[in-house]
Structures are given as structure tokens and as C-alpha cells.
Image: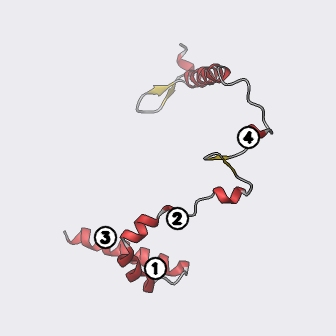
Amino acid sequence: MLDVLKLNTGYGFWTPLVLLASGVIACLVVLIIRSFGEKRYKPKTEQTLPFLSGAGVTDPSALKVSSKNLYWGFTQGLSSVFNGLKGFHSGDVNDFVTWSIALMALILLVMLVR
């Protein structure tokens, strides 16, 4: 290959044309795999409707799982910790930043003392 096309980085070299050729080959492989896909799919028909255990879903918001439901076991298991922390929760972003900076300063102090 031409030495003019090689970029020396100090840690070795790389050739942009090899990267470009690799990208083109990867795209071709993806297109070949995609061509083996299901041909009977029809967009904007019943095939695109959500399926939830055989029951039709009329309201798309019913499919959303809230974080309250998602982390229920976690919050129940640590409810004593969360109840203790509720007194510190003000909802103000400035308070969270202050606590974060104070915690980082404490960690830095502990690391420097050791």
C-alpha cells in the first residue's frame, strides 16, 4: 500500500482506506443478512399492533411500566433506608449538587488521609 495513505499516530499507524473498506463490507454483510428476512411483513396493518398475551391493547399508554412498578421489590427491601432519607429530600437540584460536592470532598479527604 502507498505510504502516503498511512497516518502515523506515534503509537503505530492506521490506514483510513482500510477503515472505509471495512465499513462497506460490514454494510454489505448486514444487507445480505437482512435480505433473508420475512417477506410477508406488511407495514401499517394488524401485524404492527402491540400484542400483550393475546389481549388486544386499545390504549398504548397501558403498555408502559412505571419505575414505581419496575423497582417495587428494590424499594420494598430497602424501605427503611428510603424512609430515613426522605427527610433529606427537598427536590431542589442545588441541594443535590451540594450533597454531591460534599460527598466527593469527604471521599477525597479519606483518600488523602490514608
Specify the amino acid type for callout 4.
Thr
Quarter of the image holding residue 36?
top right
The residue to which callout 1 is attached is 98
Percent from the top left, x then y, of residue 60?
Answer: 71, 55
Are the residues flagged by discs 1 and 3 in contact, CB closer than 8 Å?
A: no
Calculate the distance from the C-alpha at mark 3 to the C-alpha at mark 2: 37 Å
Calculate the distance from the C-alpha at mark 4 to the C-alpha at mark 1: 48 Å
Q: Residue furthest right?
A: 44
Residue at x-position 42% and y-position 70%: 75
**Badge 1: how crowded within 10 Å, few (<14), some, or many (20+)?**
few
Calculate the distance from the C-alpha at mark 3 to the C-alpha at mark 4: 53 Å
The residue to which callout 3 is attached is 108
Indicate whether 22 appears above or below 94: above
**Badge 4: how crowded within 10 Å, few (<14), some, or many (20+)?**
few
The residue to which callout 2 is attached is 69
Q: Nearer the viewer, mark 1 or mark 3?
A: 1
Specify the amino acid type for callout 2.
Asn
Q: Nearer the viewer, residue 69 or 34?
A: 69
Q: Nearer the viewer, residue 15 or 33?
A: 33
Calculate the distance from the C-alpha at mark 1 to the C-alpha at mark 3: 15 Å
Percent from the top left, x then y, of residue 96?
Answer: 48, 77
Which type of secondary structure does the marked residue at label 4 adopt? helix
Say whether disc 3 or disc 4 marks the residue closer to the N-terminus: 4
Q: Residue furthest top?
A: 1
**Badge 2: how crowded within 10 Å, few (<14), some, or many (20+)?**
few
Calculate the distance from the C-alpha at mark 2 to the C-alpha at mark 4: 26 Å
Are the residues flagged by discs 3 and 4 in contact, CB closer than 8 Å?
A: no
Which type of secondary structure does the marked residue at label 3 adopt? helix
